[in-house]
Amino acid sequence: MTQFPFWVLFISFCLLLNVTNSAEEELKQSMINFLGKLSNKSGQPDPSFGWNMTSDPCKNLWKGVVCDSQSIYVTRIILDGFNLSGILHANSLCSGQTLAEHLSVLCLSDNNIGGEIPAEIANCKQLTHLYISGNQFSGDLPDSLSQLNNLKRLDISHNQLSGNLPDLPQIAGLTYFLAQNNQLGGVIPKFNFSNLLQFNVSFNNFSGPIPNLNGRFSESSFMGNPELCGEPLPKKCPPSPPESIYVTGIILDGFNLSGILDANSLCSGQTLAEHLSVLCLSDNNIGGEIPAEIANCKQLTHLYIRGNQFSGDLLDSLSQLNNLKRLDISHNQLSGNLPALPQIMGLTYFFAQNNQLGGVIPKFNFSNLMQFNVSFNNFSGPIPNLNGRFSESSFLAFHGWMH
């Protein structure tokens, strides 16, 4: 058995002791800073609380501090009704690993603490109970509150908080949520009301319909929100408006239009780009190039622009229209090579006759194509294997040779 010299063991012990002492000192300093910010604007904690660097939070019974059964870790800080008038400096409280990993209860109710609830509160990930009611907290609730995955009880009532609620329903174990007497607004999120034992958002500025409560809560939990409606309130919600009507097709064939195709206007808006499936502009005098932005109308299934004055090369962006089933670009003045249209798996109709297109015909999946015509262009080289699908008329005036 290997024996270590005494001096090695002694130095190791000293180093370990030094690390432990350093962590304890850091913990105490963080807590003192927290209480100082919480107490008043001067940042100096009240000496009567006993929070100082010469004592131990657990062994010397710091006021408002509760530790675990072995008096090692601080698990609860309970400072209700101490007339504290500073701010909640969560960065001091939750930045240290030791405290952040063990603090489960923070009670600061019935004081005069002001300012916003800081986003850093989410770093105290073991919090199960957070009580800050009866203070002067203001501003929006931070989105990071919804990251407190262990939270069971949250009381933010009787403050001056505003804005919308964050995504608190994602906290699966939340059983108590009290937010009455604030200035919170927006729509009430869809909590799992079956899990909630207490819930109150009365006397705020919430609006819209109350979610399905599964018969859990009464009118008193929602009163004092003038724009709120639906059961259990006596105010009925107005009938739901009809579902939004989306433009799915634009058909302007044969209107003697003589401008250009401004696809940036057509396809830049999210609503139109997501629902427009048919664009028909055939038999007009529209000129210029087919713009790359047409690919932003990703839901297009039918694009008909035959019989116009379109010119220039077909852009590769056309091959990004993955939902396209029918494409008719015939009877224009288009030139250049065809883009990678075969990668559009659902394409069943392709008409490109009577243009000035050239190069080699790509290898389409001709088994899927129901109609195909590239006659009277400048294509060259061998015609791909057609699987017996199409006749000579689809390739007339072709400068290559049949496969």
Image (cartoon, rainbow, N blue to C red):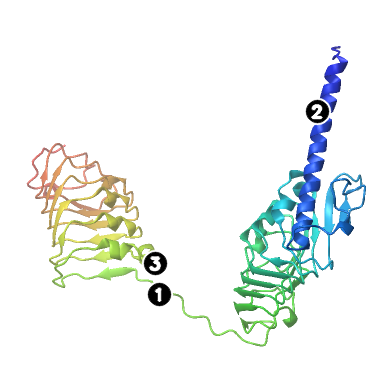
With 268 as the anchor, is 170 left or right in this view? Answer: right
Q: Quadrant of the C terminus?
A: top left
Q: Position of residue 29 (x, y in %)?
A: 78, 47
Residue drawn at 34 percent across, 52 percent down? 322
Q: Where is residue 290 in the image (x, y as percent from the top left)?
A: 21, 56
With 194 as the anchor, is 342 left or right in this view? Answer: left
Q: Visible in this render: residue 125? A: no
Are the two marked residues, 1 and 2, in contact with CB atoms closer than 8 angstroms? no
> Mark 1 is on which residue type?
Ile
Residue drawn at 84 percent across, 66 percent down? 82
Q: Residues within 10 Å of mark 2 (few under 14, many from 20)?
A: few
Of the image marks 3 and 1, the number of the one nearer the N terminus: 1
Q: Nearer the viewer, residue 236 or 102?
A: 102
Does 309 sit above or below residue 198?
above
Q: Position of residue 53 (x, y in %)?
A: 84, 46
Q: Visible in this render: residue 154? A: yes
> Mark 3 is on which residue type?
Thr
Q: Give the residue pinned by disc 3.
A: 271
Q: Give the residue pinned by disc 2.
A: 15
The numbered dot on residue 245 is 1
Q: How crowded is mark 3: few (under 14 residues within 10 Å), some or many (20 or more)?
A: few
In what element is the residue under mark 2? helix
Q: Nearer the viewer, residue 296 or 358?
A: 296
Closer to the eye: label 3 or 1? 3
Of the image marks 2 and 3, the number of the one nearer the N terminus: 2
